[in-house]
Image (cartoon, helix red, strand yellow):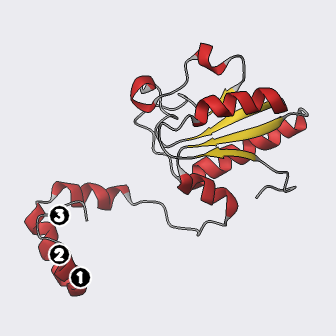
Amino acid sequence: MTSNDSPFLVVTGPTASGKSTLAVRLAQAFEREVINIDSVQIYKGLTIGSAQLLQEEQQGVPHHLIGERNISESIDAKWYRDEVLRIHTSLEKKGKGSLLCVGTNLYLLSLLYDLAELPRSDTATRARLESQSTSQLYQELQQCDKQAASRIHPNDKLR
């Protein structure tokens, strides 16, 4: 999990189950700082839609990875894993512990298990594909992968 396998305290559960409130209480009780692991709360300007804790709701407990990135920035499981480990290690060096408040289980799993090395997305290819019509994309899919084309609806541009 980490370089020295120092344990995390973890709060996880379904949406709107009170994870953030519980995380604050536990962080106070165990003198820890909260590391937020949520695919939406990381973004600035999404306070209401993502149920980000307001400053007063954090009750003086430092929170990390809340409202820190612009919505235009791409974030993935590897980025989250690296950031959580960096923050966790930094807190340990200061003699502090961390508590993970998990809203996105994929990001938690990225901490528990190794991630496969994948190539970075090809922006030129993505731009070319996004500029094509749905029918053009489906024709290309039929040529490249007939089996997938048989499962995917011709109007499903996302897939």
Amino acid identity at mark 2: Glu
Q: Percent position (x, y) of residue 27?
A: 76, 31
* Of labels 1 and 3, the one closer to you: 3
Crowd rating for badge 3 (residues with CA inside 10 Å; few <14, some 14–19, many 20+): few
Left or right: where does residue 9 sit relative to residue 14? right
Q: Amino acid at mark 1?
A: Cys
Residue in front for this viewpoint, 154 or 47: 47
Q: Which mark is residue 156?
A: 3
Q: Could you tell me how far apart the alpha carbons at marks 1 and 3 are, in whole angstroms?
A: 16 Å
Q: Residue at x 45, y 39 (%)?
A: 73
Which residue position holds label 1? Answer: 144
- SS for dot 3: loop
Q: Which residue is more in the foreground, 100 or 20? A: 20
Q: CA distance from mark 2 to mark 3?
A: 13 Å
Q: Which residue is mark 2?
A: 140
Q: Secondary structure at mark 2?
A: helix
